[in-house]
Amino acid sequence: MLTIDSLNGGHGKQVVLAEPSDATAHAVLGGVCGDLEPRAVADAYREVLAAHPGCGRAGHMLACLTGEGAAGDGSSGAAPG
């Protein structure tokens, strides 16, 4: 079975944790890995949001994956990144 780590999503999560404004890491983690392992990626984004609560991109991706929070309506007040 494929896992987030075997798809390089684990590395993507580490990059997003270290640099939450890295759009490419978000695209890999949320887009590619999110399609294949949505639960693992949602957990990764919860971890990112715990470390970077103002990361709008992480909040958006989590909302897209799970319906938690606001996705793209601008209501979070957080700047992208």
Image (cartoon, helix red, strand yellow):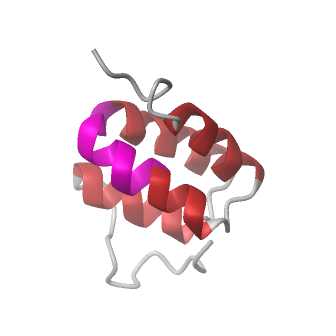
Which residue is nearer to you in this view: 69 or 12?
12
Count of picture labels: 0
Magenta residue check for 49: no
On the picture, is 37 further left or further right than 54? Answer: left
What residue is drawn where x is 57% and y is 50%? 49
What residue is drawn where x is 40% and y is 85%? 74
Whole-percent x and y of residue 44? 49, 37
On the picture, is 79 further left or further right than 6? Answer: right
Placement of 30 over or under 77, stated as above or below: above
Q: Residue furthest top?
A: 1
Whole-percent x and y of residue 68? 29, 54
Which is the main secondary structure of the residues drawn in magenta? helix
* Image: magenta residue range: 29-39
What residue is drawn where x is 47% and y is 48%? 29
Which residue is nearer to you in this view: 9 or 80?
9
**Res 13 → quadrant:** top right
Looking at the rendered image, the quarter that the N terminus falls into is top left
Whole-percent x and y of residue 25? 58, 56
Which residue is nearer to you in this view: 40 or 55?
40
Placement of 27 over or under 46, stated as above or below: below
What residue is drawn where x is 74% and y is 57%? 19
On the picture, is 50 further left or further right than 41? Answer: right
Q: Residue furthest right?
A: 18
Looking at the rendered image, the quarter that the C terminus falls into is bottom right
